[in-house]
Image (spheres, grey):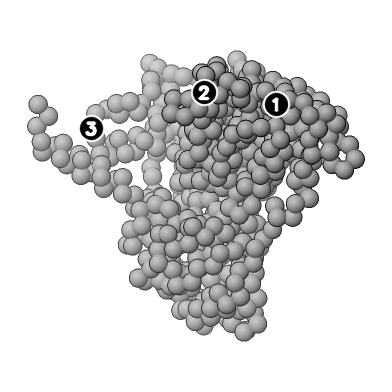
Amino acid sequence: MSLDTTTAGGRSATVTGAQALVSALEQAGVDVVFGVAGHTNVAFLDALSRSTIRYVSTRHEQVAVHAADGYYRVSHRPAVVLTTSGPGMANTVAALGDASLDCSGVIVISGESQSYYAGRDGFQEVSLHSDTSQWEIARPLTKRAWRVAHPDVLMFGIATAFRVALTGAPGPILMSVPLDIFSHKQAYEIPDIAARGALAARPRPDRDAVVRAAELFASARRPLILAGGGAVLADADGAITALAEQLQIPVVTTLSGQGAISKYHELYGGFVSPFGTKPAHALITSADCVLVLGSRLAEFDMSSWSPEHTLSADRSAIVQVDIDPSVIGRQYDVRIGIQADVRAAVEDIHEQLRATSATGPAAPWWRAPELAEISRSWEQEIAASLLTDALPIKPERLMADLRGAMPADGILFCDAGLRGAIAQTFPVDGPRLLHFPSGWGTMGFAIAASLGAKVAEPDRVVVAEIGDGGFTSLMTALVTAVEYEIPVVWIVRNNALFSSIAVYHRKHFDNELFGTAFSNDDTGLPALNIAAIATAAGAGAVRVERPGDLRAAIDVAIASGRPYVVEVVSEPAPRGRASGHWDVNRVLAEQQAEITTTSLV
């Protein structure tokens, strides 16, 4: 039922602050809150119980924020997180980093101790450096964090929360509310957040910048488009594809930009990163003009900014488009910077090119023999890897069977440690279908973010692929899925390792994977039986040890309509196909060289 608090003129009847907040969320179109109960937020929970908004109790606050993040990534609609004071609010921090660096519009409302106890060490008050400073814990990892100081500014605060979280580059906010303000009764003016057009605004680019960018691109001999996560956030995939097709320009992406053009399209050139594809790095190191769309051009996307492996301002004229002006020119000198919505900018550049009948280079430069050979050999290598029947099960074989089992519009989440191999071997036909914690890289992201995605898109298949380390780090998400009957399928690679770290451990050090390996049983298989744990929690589960059993197990899991874990006993030392560069390798190699030539006594 709806929580009816309003009277004529937008004023409310005399209600609690919590009731007014819930009414504002209803009017804003919020349909789910993820959270954890605490003494400071029970008044909010009481109001929520009388509303139309669904509440999902997640048992851990990090899971709640990841779930809200996943909800936003697939729907571009905001979800709200409710947490309590002190350790409850602090538990959100790891997940806030992912939401912030991957631009998810997540709104966190946290209770805190009574306002009239400020500075007196109320229970769970954070006041070591300043009074009632709990909100400052989240400050570095949010677009904005603040404390509501008085009931009269509560409604102003929630309107500000939506405006800040959803305009410009989206991102998380945290609003900390003292428990007495949740319970304070008065007449509140409920803001009509949904009617505020600024939340849907797509600022268009400066006209002169568009003309100059179009001229530069039309005259380039080897133009290239680099699409980042901001292109997906702007729903710019159709505009990017149309522009690329007119000028026959190849498109490469960052990890978070995958889907900005179909990975089946002939103009898709792969993705960049230390473990990016060889064709993508060949293209970006050959281009003379690069249109960068919605990317911070951060270290992990740009191969630690190594010019031999990625973008170079000395080699390429760079046109950078971003809704956030602070990222334009931050990493590279740009020829033209355009602050605008990515889709609007691409549409305007395309229209300008059509108006001048621009056709691009006379012949597609990306079909030059040397570039074509790199693409051909890469495709053959990947295709061959997908067919292996080797034991233990290879990740590539798993990805082939998973791609075959999932529908075209199925949504896949994965953790940071698996993102390279998955991105190389799992094609998607459009945006919002493949999700990683690409900026912050939190382990366990996928198990929890997939919950929110399934809540947002209940009629679509949602699968999370995750390692045994990541799965066990936030396994409470499985309990929540069972309790609320959220039918996510988790594919868990169990190889008794933090396997992405084991790659660097093996490469640079000789200490038997100290701190990186888990235990095996007498047969050499992983000792931890994840399928048994999932069964005990009430989920469907199966343990797969042979590649021939994979496809049938995945098909059963997807068709089950219930939370389901497919545990895959997998390769302990999977091959990493890395064509980029990461400075971490250089540092570790130099350290190991020093260790081997210096006495440790």
Judge by depth and name the residue closer to the eye, 526 or 346: 346
Q: Which residue is mark 1?
A: 182
From the top left corner, tell me how far across and down residue 319 is, in percent. 49, 69
Q: Residues within 10 Å of mark 1 (few under 14, many from 20)?
A: many
The tag on residue 510 is 3
Q: Kindly state the secondary structure of the residue where label 1 is placed.
A: helix
**Discs 1, 2 touching: Cβ within 8 Å:** no
From the top left corner, tell me how far across and down residue 120 is, in percent. 52, 19
Upstream in sequence: badge 3 or badge 2:
2
**Image quadrant containing the C terminus:** top left
Identified by mark 3, the residue type is Asp
Q: Is residue 77 left or right of residue 333?
A: right
Q: Kindly state the secondary structure of the residue where label 2 is placed.
A: loop
Number of residue marks: 3
Res. 290 visible in picture: yes
Q: Residues within 10 Å of mark 3 (few under 14, many from 20)?
A: few
Identified by mark 1, the residue type is Phe
Q: Which residue is mark 2?
A: 119
Judge by depth and name the residue closer to the eye, 83 or 426: 83
Identified by mark 2, the residue type is Gly
Upstream in sequence: badge 3 or badge 1:
1
Dividing the picture into quadrants, the one containing residue 45 is top right
Q: Residue furthest right?
A: 8
Q: Residues within 10 Å of mark 2 (few under 14, many from 20)?
A: some
